[in-house]
Image: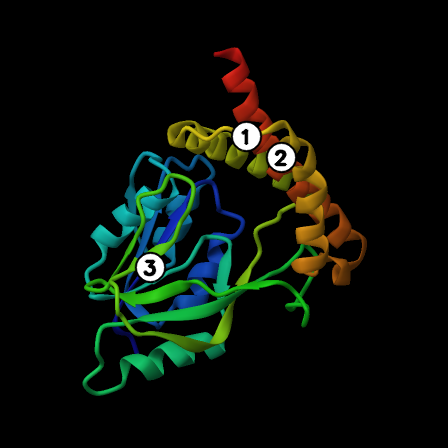
Amino acid sequence: MSFPLSIFIIAKNEVDRIGPTLESVRGLSDDIVVIDSGSTDGTQELAESLGARVIFNPWPGYGLQKQFGEDQCRHDWMLNVDADEVVTPDLADAIRAVLSQPDLVPCGYETDIIEMFPGEARPHPWAFRLSPVRFYHKKVGRYSASPVHDRVDMVKGTPIKRLAGVIEHRSIRSLGHELIKLNAYADMQADDLDRKGRNISAVRLVAEFPLAFLKAYVARRHFVRGLYGFMTAMNYAFYRYLRLAKHWERRLGR
């Protein structure tokens, strides 16, 4: 049984990952929309075969692409899932329970997103989690227009509640894939720093790598994930340093 819910997903070249994503929300909505920014690997055909509406939109940045996705949704209640994420059955049941409530008022719901590494069949109990708003009513929430951050901005005073269940996030295909992804993200963040006119000090540039490593390895608990956790913490630290280095290099060139 589907509910008055729209689900939107942004994607590009995700044929190896979007199948489980779409399967995890099948039956939850009669309006599943995939916003594709130019896949060449068959992502569009697979998504359509699994019941999604596929709409092409050239890549404008994270926030703007998700705003475009919101505008394609037919229902007022919306759920955003990325193409490398899977909605667990517990979370799907929690969403159904919310939408079954009488006199449901527009609001937003936070849900835990738990990162998973290659080779992990289930989430590590101590894995790092984020808890953003992903399920919300269009009257009180909308993605920000930021090109680098994808965050739902809620109308001031809107109730924000929590959902049971989690989203499993499988963002890393391999360490090499992660570095390519983070390098591209570093370019976008350097552009964002340029637009904001930020001036990065030499001290900040030197300190960024070790501090970012500690943030990932200790604060985000990558140390509980063994050697792979160490290596992903190193990748994260290099990306955080690289975005500042690229920004500094551009200012030097000017």
Q: Residue reaching furthest bottom?
A: 102
- SS label for mark 1: loop
Screen quadrant of the N terminus: bottom left
Q: Is residue 20 above or below residue 213?
A: below
Q: Is residue 238 above or below residue 75?
A: above
Q: Position of residue 215 (x, y in %)?
A: 66, 52
The numbered dot on residue 204 is 2
Task: Estimate how packed mark 2 is, as few (under 14), some (14 to 19) or many (20 or more) residues with alpha carbons within 10 Å.
Answer: few
Residue holding disc 3: 51
The numbered dot on residue 85 is none
Of circles 3 and 2, the one toward us is 2
Task: Estimate how packed mark 1 is, as few (under 14), some (14 to 19) or many (20 or more) residues with alpha carbons within 10 Å.
Answer: some
Left or right: 48 in relation to 236: left
Residue 20 in view (yes/no): no
- SS label for mark 3: loop
Q: Quadrant of residue 133?
A: bottom left
Which residue appears at 49% of the width and 30% of the height? 190
The reply to whether dot 1 and dot 2 touch (C-beta < 8 Å) is yes
Marks 1/2: CA–CA distance: 7 Å
Q: Earlier in the sequence, mark 3 or mark 2?
A: 3
- SS label for mark 2: helix
Left or right: 19 in relation to 245: left
Q: Earlier in the sequence, mark 3 or mark 1?
A: 3
Q: Position of residue 67 (x, y in %)?
A: 28, 48
Residue holding disc 1: 200
Task: Estimate how packed mark 3 is, as few (under 14), some (14 to 19) or many (20 or more) residues with alpha carbons within 10 Å.
Answer: some
Q: Residue reaching furthest right?
A: 227
Amino acid bearing label 1: Ile
Amino acid bearing label 3: Gly
Left or right: 166 in relation to 158: right
Of circles 3 and 1, the one toward us is 1
